Amino acid sequence: MAATKKPAAKKPAAKKPVVIIDDVHIVYKVYASGKRATGAAARNGLFAKKTNLRSVHAVKGVSFTVYQGDTIGIIGSNGSGKSSLMRALAGLTPIDQGAIYSYARPTLLGVGAALLPNLSGEKNTMLGGMAMGFAKKDMEKSIDEVAKFAGLEEFIDLPMRTYSSGMAARLRFAIAAHRDHDILIIDEALAVGDLEFRKRSEARMREMRDSAGTVFLVSHSMKSIADTCNRVIWIEKGELKMDGKPEKVIAAYTKAIGQALDK
């Protein structure tokens, strides 16, 4: 009797690339005060210092591809180029070489996102939601929900200038997270909330990821990165140092940071 042939297993559908970073370089031109003059120049009362224009190579040939539904952690020490790269992805910082391809316009949420200080949290919620494409009547219905998520029910009618930096950052996240985004970039937004808010934020990011959105999380909190992301990119001194599973990249990063502190 001939053996029955098992049907071939279906291959999982290929994930759709949504962001391609291709050999990106970012160079800032900054004025430096220069070194203090010495010798004859100083004695003759000439310029004590001479300003000059310097180039700071913030991002150096970084390349990677991100797929639909990914939650990407971006880690690295201060000044490593993380935020510069994310601002370039959002279209806020020009690149000097390479290319960035994105199938949808990314939304950047950061602790520096603009809120109007003389308007109430309620008015800022309305304006923020409408700027993201919500109808005014829909945002009017959503004020209480946004305020509850941010933990600001008692303060939502107060001017933003009366908010602490943590309160303002929670409101920014709540406004942005109220809708699903094709691509959302969160820069240190979770570093200012209490444990309960972080749990709500991380749960919301997982919901956005599961709805096929793509999330970038720039953070120094390795716990937030490990709990939320399915992939981590480590950028150091403007270069891509490592790209892979969270546990492997975080372990390598924390080991390198520990070794640097020991020196």
Image (cartoon, grey):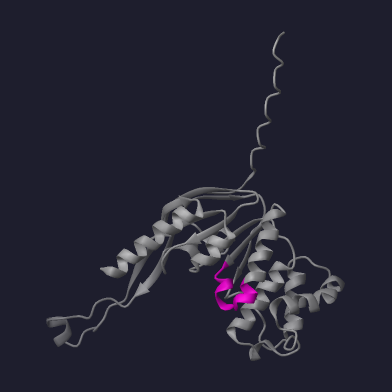
Q: Is residue 206 above or below residue 187?
A: above
Residue at 72% in and 88% down:
155
Whether 103 is among the magenta residues is no
Q: Is residue 214 above or below residue 203?
A: above
Q: Quadrant of the C terminus?
A: bottom left
Position of residue 21 measured from the top left corner of the image (x, y, whole percent): 52, 50
Left or right placement of residue 176 versus residue 186 in this view? right
Highlighted range, magenta: 187-198
Position of residue 62 measured from the top left corner of the image (x, y, whole percent): 45, 52
Q: Is residue 71 above or below residue 163?
A: above
Position of residue 78 measured from the top left corner of the image (x, y, whole percent): 42, 69
Name the foreground residue: 218 vs 248. 248
Position of residue 236 measured from the top left corner of the image (x, y, whole percent): 39, 60
* Residue 55 in view, yes or no: yes
Residue at 67% in and 53% down:
104
Residue furthest to the left: 39
Residue 57, image quadrant: bottom left
Residue 44, image quadrant: bottom left
Q: Quadrant of the N terminus?
A: top right
Residue at 72% in and 75% down:
149
Whether 192 is among the magenta residues is yes
Residue furthest to the top: 1
Residue at 12% in and 81% down:
39
* Residue 87 in view, yes or no: no
Name the foreground residue: 14 vs 124. 14
State whether the magenta stretch is mostly helix, strand or loop: helix
Residue 195, image quadrant: bottom right
Name the foreground residue: 9 vs 126. 9
